[in-house]
Image (cartoon, grey):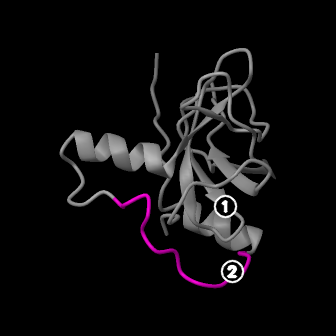
Amino acid sequence: MLAARDAFAGSPGFAVEYIPSPDALPAWPVLRSGFLGSASADADAQLLGIDLPAGPRGGPVFDGTGQLIGLALPGGAGGDRLVTVSQLRKALASAGKADQPASPHAPVPAGPKPRASVDQVYEDSLKTSLQVITAP
């Protein structure tokens, strides 16, 4: 379910987030679609490019085939940013949490993957997203 390589700018994508609620009740996440943004002024960052409702970030981002391509995080004036799969692998490896980080030159399966339906992406996202509920 993890993408073999980072997605490129202009690729279709799906971001999943929970909308903040004042009543601290469980809710279903929202799925937003759009096109991934370009690299930001920071050479190591990519803009998310998918409009999300106001609120906290940290939800999963999927490509058009339904593979996890990263996490949505808040950004600066340029908009939200995408923490890519390669950045996640690198962070997990340096934290000692990953056995073998994927090589940037790892072989990629031949041929295009079929597009996933929006319903399938949403159902799969429920396995990778987490709602944090806090009460005042």
Extent of the magenta region:
102-116
Question: Which secondary structure lies at badge 1?
Answer: strand
Residue 42 lies in quadrant: top right
Which of these two is toward me, 17 or 50?
Answer: 50
Residue 133 image offset from top left, x and y in percent: 47, 33
9 to the left or right of 90: right
Residue 112, label in figure: 2
Q: Earlier in the sequence, mark 1 or mark 2?
A: 1
Residue 63, label in figure: 1
Residue 100 image offset from top left, x and y in percent: 24, 60
What residue is rendered at 66% in x and 63% in y? 122
Which of these two is toward me, 13 or 108?
Answer: 108
Front disc: 1 or 2:
2
Check disc 1 and give the amino acid type: Asp
98 to the left or right of 74: left
What residue is rendered at 75% in x and 32% in y? 53
21 to the left or right of 87: right
Which of these two is toward me, 118 or 112?
Answer: 112
Residue 95 image offset from top left, x and y in percent: 22, 39
Q: Label 2 near label 1: C-beta < 8 Å? A: no
Residue 104 image offset from top left, x and y in percent: 43, 58
Check disc 2 and give the amino acid type: Pro
Mark 1–mark 2 Cα distance, whole angstroms, equals: 13 Å
Q: Residues within 10 Å of mark 2 (few under 14, many from 20)?
A: few
6 is within the stretch colored magenta: no
